[in-house]
Image (cartoon, rainbow, N blue to C red):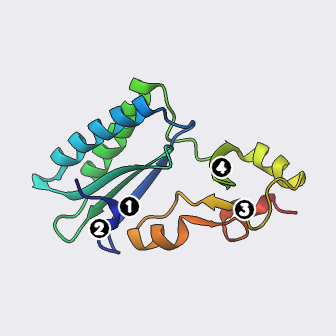
Amino acid sequence: MTTTQQMPPDARLWVYQSNKLLSDAEQKAIQEEGEQFIAGWSAHGAALKASFEILYGRFVVIAVDEKQALASGCSIDKSVHFIKGLEQKLSLNFFDRMQVAYKSGNEILACSLNEFEKLAEQKRVDENTIVFNNMVSSKAAFEKEWEIPLKQSWQSRVLK
């Protein structure tokens, strides 16, 4: 199984954040289904060279090397449908874009943007708190811009 690290810098990439920390059983089920999905993922009949992995027990990362075959609208729809299927099967939410994940010591925590704003007001998070930018869309951006200080993120508006 190819990992994100093995993909080229220009690989197209999607990050899906779970609404909760995934249990070991959930991670195992997601990993198995993800490997099956990637193995059969294609665009207009051409197999896609792709990777799938779970990071920090919370994030599902899918990447595709478009040098071999472009990820078409239909193939991207298939990946979204796959993630939505995981949501239904495991009672998860991977599409809540208003949930902020951040590092607190060695833990990855998540909360609503409103709760995160309250944490900033209480000085429990600050401009140097590491947050996750799940809007990255290439492996190169993922490596440089996924884990960033709050002051460099779109969530920085919570800082007053």
Say which residue label 2 marks: 7
Q: Residues within 10 Å of mark 2 (few under 14, many from 20)?
A: many
Label count reads 4
What amino acid type is highlighted by mark number 1? Leu
Quarter holding residue 140: bottom left
**Could you give the CA–CA distance between mark 1 and mark 3, rounded to whole angstroms?**
24 Å
Q: Amino acid at mark 4?
A: Val
Could you tell me residue 84's position as x and y percent?
Answer: 40, 35
Asked if residue 99 can be seen in this view, the reply is no
Q: Secondary structure at mark 3?
A: loop
Q: CA distance from mark 4 to mark 2?
A: 26 Å
Instruction: Please state which of the two labelled residues, at mark 3 or mark 4, is closer to the viewer.
Output: 3
Q: Secondary structure at mark 2?
A: loop
Q: Earlier in the sequence, mark 4 or mark 1?
A: 1
When the figure is inspected, residue 47 is found, relative to residue 9, above or below; the finding is above
- Contact between marks 2 and 1 (CB within 8 A): the answer is yes
- Mark 1 lies on a secondary structure that is strand
Q: Residue at x 23, y 48 (%)?
A: 38
Numbered badge on residue 13: 1
Asked if labels 1 and 4 touch by Cβ distance under 8 angstroms, the answer is no
